[in-house]
Image (cartoon, rainbow, N blue to C red):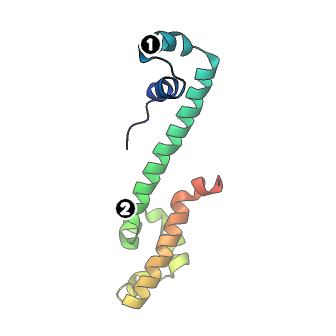
Amino acid sequence: MESLNFENLIKELFVSRKGIDEKHWNSLWKNYKKSAIVKDLRFIYDKIMSKTVKIDELVKFYLENKDEPINFITQHPEYKEQLNKILGDDWQNKLTNTFLRNKLILRFNDWLFKLTFKDILKDI
């Protein structure tokens, strides 16, 4: 995915969508970038990019831990009590039974998804 550079996005808007000659872009940008509307757009851009970075980090966390409750609880023992409530106190012993394992993994993944994305989901 191409990196979203603020100035390049504005340039693309003016050159390809508004018909500004690329030769005149630099002089136009020199003055225009100081305007209030560009400052507002920059604020919006920065907010979106910070959310994008956060979502990327959350997806990485989820994918690293998905299907791996034992590794997760080893790395994050602060969730042991909560996970025991969700999966049952003896869930680690049940992972050897294929049928129970699949059921526990599905439950774990559902819980992990909600835990990981709770801040994003509350905004929806």
Name the residue: 46% across, 12% down. Answer: 24
Q: Residues within 10 Å of mark 1 (few under 14, many from 20)?
A: few
Image location (x, y in percent) of residue 29: 50, 14
Mark 1 or mark 2, whichever is nearer to me? 1
Q: Amino acid at mark 1?
A: Asn
Say which residue label 1 marks. Answer: 26
Q: Amino acid at mark 2?
A: Glu
Q: Quick one: SS at disc 1? A: helix
Seen from the viewer's position, the closer of residues 109 and 15 is 15
Is the residue 124 above or below the residue 32 in the image?
below
Q: Tell me where residue 91 sits by quadrant.
A: bottom left
- The count of marks equals 2
Image location (x, y in percent) of residue 110: 52, 71
Q: Tell me where residue 18 sits by quadrant.
A: top right
Q: Tell me: 50 left or right of 98.
A: right
Q: Quadrant of the N terminus?
A: top left
Name the residue: 54% across, 10% down. Answer: 31
